[in-house]
Amino acid sequence: MLLDVSKALRAPGEEIAFTHRDEIPPQEIFGDTVTFDSVVMTGYYSMMDHNLRLRGRLQTVAHGECAGCFAPVDYEVDVPFDETFLHISREKTYAGMEDELETDDDERLAFEGSKVELHQLALTLTLLDLPIRFVCEPECKIMKKARQDNESHACQKELPDQHPFSALQQLLTKDQEV
């Protein structure tokens, strides 16, 4: 969905409050499907020169499965954001500004007209906030067992010949003995 920023274009420098809702379709992440509630972005926007500044918070709930027991898990996404969009007008594009845009970073956010597309920003902020794997809260028996098994393995100090470079260490020792 688009955010109408025409008020900021008419009143440069003035901060205007906004609430924006968006939908993120289910995402396939590491073989698991994650679904999302409606995304709500709240905050302020203002226009300064050719830059639109959006700042505020993005909130939603992600739904996945526990990595251990596969039970449904909800993860609350609450991310602050502060982004700047470049306003591109057709007159400036025709007057040679597109050469200037090509030299800028390819990741630069831009918009044309009086409406800004926020879907990609919402998707990026949401996905970057997700954990690597979903786990039950409180921790399920399977994840607790996996953590205990992981902790029971010997550390490098106890078994020095069990590290990736142990074969090199043995060669060095053999050369010194000769």
Image (cartoon, helix red, strand yellow):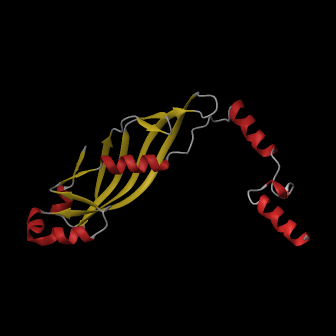
Quarter of the figure with residue 96: bottom left
Instruction: Give the tally of numbered discs.
Output: 0
Q: Nearer the viewer, residue 38 or 15?
A: 38
Q: Mark yes or no: residue 128 visible.
A: yes
Q: Nearer the viewer, residue 129 or 81?
A: 129
| Left-right relation of 126 to 106 | right
Q: Residue at x 73, y 57 (%)?
A: 164
Image position of 97 with respect to 114: above or below: below
Quarter of the figure with residue 159: bottom right
| Left-right relation of 90 to 56 | left
Q: Residue at x 48, y 44 (%)?
A: 77
> The N terminus appears in which quarter of the rendering?
top left
> The C terminus appears in which quarter of the rendering?
bottom right
Q: Residue furthest right?
A: 177
Q: Residue furthest front?
A: 178
Residue 72 lies, in percent from the top left, at 55, 28
Residue 117 lies, in percent from the top left, at 25, 50
Q: Residue at x 81, y 43 (%)?
A: 152
Image position of 1 with respect to 103: above or below: above
| Left-right relation of 172 to 49 | right
Image position of 178 with respect to 108: above or below: below
Q: Nearer the viewer, residue 122 or 169?
A: 169
Q: Mark yes or no: residue 14 visible.
A: no
Residue 50 lies, in percent from the top left, at 21, 68
Quarter of the figure with residue 45: bottom left
Residue 157 lies, in percent from the top left, at 84, 58
